[in-house]
Image: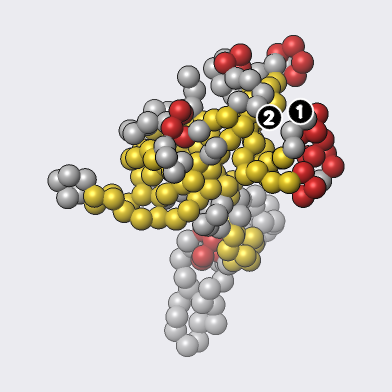
Amino acid sequence: MKKFILGTKIGMTQIFAADGTCTPVTVVQAGPCAVVQKKTEETDGYSAVRLGYGETELKKLNKPERGVFEKLDMKKGYRFVKEFKPENVADYEVGQEITVGTMFADGDSVDVRGTSKGKGYAGTIKRYGNKIGPITHGSKYHRGLGSMGPNTDPGRVMPGKHMPGHMGSETVTVQNLTVMKVDSERGLLLIKGAVPGPKGALLEIAESVKA
């Protein structure tokens, strides 16, 4: 069975093995989620399930979002709804609860997707790691973006030129992370290493595609 769940990043800490080895981990509040919709080949052209995470009142959702849950006669809605493609959609039913304990086990390899921290408007040195200019007094070109391109031919800035601009706040997937511990009682996942986003960020956790 393909494994997947939605969660919230709590923060980072460290755990110690029996031999004293220290491992940095990210603590994720994973689930509980609910199946809110099934997509099939007959009706949608592909198979998938949509998971809802983060219960909320229906009146706090906009009309299209609220309509999804009203069709299911649900008294509460979910703040986040994401789509996953399991091996067999028939194994899932609308309204079925998915918890971290039923999905994951210690030692699993997962891919974690989230939105990276926004850094605002940044120059090329911070954004791309470009080399800094001379720091001497007469240079007058310390943190510039460098040569803009050819002079006469072709006489234009070439595509892909590193330029200042908006940095961060984009979808990032970190692959092949190891689940160090699953806390079924509290719904926690301890994942080795760092994952995208700030504390409180939504995360999509799925079985690794390259494991």
Are the two marked residues, 2 and 1, in contact with CB atoms closer than 8 angstroms?
yes
Among numbered discs 2 and 1, the one appearing first in the sequence: 2
For residue 64, the mark is none
Taking the spot 50% from the left edge, 50% from the top edge, the residue there is 9
Amino acid type shown at disc 1: Leu
Taking the spot 77% from the left edge, 44% from the top edge, the residue there is 58
Q: Secondary structure at mark 2?
A: strand
Direction left: furthest residue: 19
| Depth order, front residue of 124/48 | 48
From the top left corner, tell me how far across and down residue 116 is, in percent.
55, 53
Can you see residue 17?
yes
For residue 36, the mark is 2
Q: Residues within 10 Å of mark 2 (few under 14, many from 20)?
A: many
| Depth order, front residue of 94/135 | 94
Direction bottom: furthest residue: 137
| 56, above or below 150, in the image | above
Taking the spot 61% from the left edge, 17% from the top edge, the residue there is 89
Task: List the residue tagged with mark 1.
Answer: 72
